[in-house]
Image (cartoon, rainbow, N blue to C red):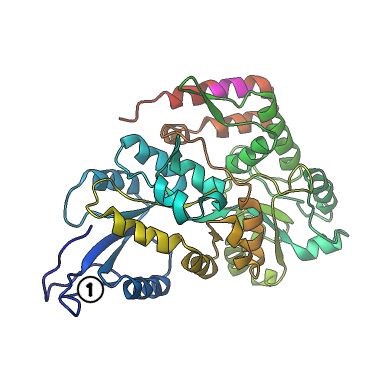
Amino acid sequence: MRRRLLALICVTGSLASGCGLLPGGHDRHTVTVWLMKDSASKEFLARFTEDFERTHDDQRLDIRIQEWTGIVEKVRKALRSHAKDAPDVIEVGNTQVPQYVDDGRLADLTLESMRDWGKEHWLPGLAEPGKEGNKQYGVPWYAANRVVIYRKDLFERAGITEPPKTRDAWLGDTEKLNSGGDQGIYLAGQDWYTLSGFIWDEGGELAQEKDYEWRGTLDTPAALRGMAFYRRLQALGEGPVDSDEEHPPQAGVFAGGKVAQIVAVPGLAQAIVQQNPGLKGKLGFFPVPGRSAARPGTVFTGGSDLVVPQNTDDQFAATAVIGALTGAKWDTELARTMNYVPNKTTLAEAVDGEPGVAAMAAGAAHGRATPNTPQWAAVEADNPIKGYMTRVLGGADPATEARRASRKITEALATDLG
């Protein structure tokens, strides 16, 4: 918020602080920014703060780092607050934005985003969750998504000279990799984020809104085709059908040395090499293949948006911070520093030098997020998609199980979150 600071009173508890009055008698005004832990390095934030305060000499930044645990309720409380230290800019997970929009306490940033923030090039997986109707509340900041991490040496041994670009070729190559005791792919049975991409590729949805009501749609023909492909791919490895990719952690499974491919964020490669240094230099990355070679497969896109609370008393200063953070200069520097995907498709070339991030960027151009409703959190709280996947992979009838899971999703989407 835009607050007057008396001389000799300093901003505390932040990564960057200002004190006193500017030369010439102008008051310094503080913009309080909440960012999430590990979203940006201290060095990046120090450079950004110095540059922003140099180019906005009447403003000072108070950047406060938040933990992800318990953040939803903390943000909701802040959005209702009128305390002097309430935030003016908040980083939120892209799929969390609909919850805050539903509370009715976010500033409408439509005009700013239409005017000069490059809205037409935003990644859809970040932009869509930040939007309700024709109004934009969340501004895309950075993204990350799954790619295929693979063993280059095992591909070479199987006679595969380049990564597959279509789903059919992916199945064929994975079958070739199933030799000599190796798994062509390790894919856990409840990896519902990966399944979502296959459903979207087929033209299906996890849920859809009609006449202001949301309903689960896993039982549509398109969604069932997505599940059918998942079942074919998953069967080419030994992934457990009754657990997700974290049980056991797939980085450890891959590090065991008998797996040719996993679907994961590229940053997991570092953990793999730490557990098995012998794999250093042997890992490669490619986008999840699509139905045709014309474009990569659709993937779930995670990441963060920036929002402004309605209760800020200086929206102009708050949007100045967002404009700087999400602009080409600092967004590409953040992407290079933290191995993220930049917020716009036009900035993808900035990460071409990092193979894993470049593979992410190719997929993010067609990325999606979970259904744009605040009630989706109730679905994930006791996720029926996971049980549906396990039962189908165990031999149950897909159509019957999809109808059952869709009913449960519909019931969860009718939940009153209060």
Which residue bears the numbered disc 1? 18
Q: Which corner quadrant holds the C terminus? A: top left
Query: Is residue 405 a member of the stretch shown in magenta?
Result: yes
Left or right: where 42 falls relative to 147: left
| 33 and 414: which is toward the camera | 33
Left or right: where 296 falls relative to 179: left
Q: In the figure, residue 96 lies in which quadrant?
A: top left
Residue at 79%, 44% (x, y): give it: 292
Question: In this rendering, does residue 394 appear at all?
Answer: no
Q: Which corner quadrant holds the N terminus? A: bottom left
Query: Is residue 222 a member of the stretch shown in magenta?
Result: no
Is the residue 59 above or below the residue 241 in the image? Answer: below
Q: In the current view of this chain or complex, which residue is farthest to the right?
A: 159
Residue at 11%, 75% (x, y): give it: 7
| Residue 224 rendering spot, x and y as whole percentages | 68, 28
Local packing at callout 1 (Cα closer than 10 Å; few below 14, some 14-19, many 20+) is many
Q: Main secondary structure of the magenta part?
A: helix
Residue at 22%, 52% (x, y): give it: 313
Is the residue 36 above or below the residue 42 in the image? Answer: above
| 37 and 154: which is toward the camera | 37
**Which secondary structure lies at badge 1?**
loop
Is the residue 401 above or below the residue 22 in the image? Answer: above
Q: Which residues are magenta?
A: 401-406
| Residue 405 rendering spot, x and y as whole percentages | 56, 25
Is the residue 68 above or below the residue 37 in the image? Answer: above
Q: Amino acid at mark 1?
A: Gly
Residue at 63%, 65% (x, y): give it: 349
| 69 and 61: which is toward the camera | 61
